Amino acid sequence: MIFEVAFGRLEEQAILSIESAEPLTAEQAIEASGILQMFPEIDLKANKIGIFGKAAKLDTVLSEGDRVEIYRPLIADPKEARKKRAAEGKVMRKGGGEKK
């Protein structure tokens, strides 16, 4: 079975493939990939993970071809950013671009 593990910083990203004869949990795949050594700032107790963009837990058993994604913490809370824009009277266009 082949799995992928992905993580990225602004300046560097990595998608690592691993192979296993049996199914792995997301945590086992992350550890087997070596990505924790490449990016020492990853803390599996703090960083959220997902499988193909859907939130997942470390004990989730992977299916063939799954990609485990390790997410960085958000810099700003999206709800707070929207409230701030609304308070400033900014109007957003569909698609997220600011209206001029």
Image: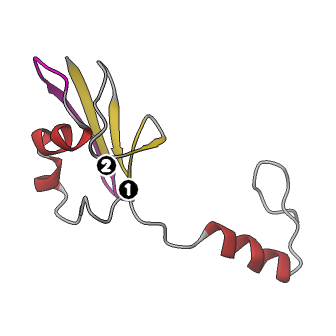
Callout 1 secondary element:
loop
The disc label shown at residue 7, or none: 2
Rendered view: 8 above or below 74: above
Relative to residue 62, is residue 77 drawn left or right?
right
Q: Position of residue 20 (x, y in %)?
A: 12, 22
Is residue 21 located in the magenta-colored stretch of the structure? yes
Which of 30/95 is in front? Answer: 30
Q: Position of residue 1 (x, y in %)?
A: 19, 17
Q: Quadrant of the C terminus?
A: bottom right
Which of 12/51 is in front? Answer: 51
Rendered view: 59 above or below 19: below
Q: Position of residue 64 (x, y in %)?
A: 29, 18
Q: Which residue is mark 1?
A: 48
At 80% across and 63% down in the image, what residue appears?
Answer: 98
At 10% across and 17% down in the image, what residue appears?
Answer: 21
Q: Amino acid at mark 2?
A: Phe
Start and end of the magenta stretch?
A: 7-23
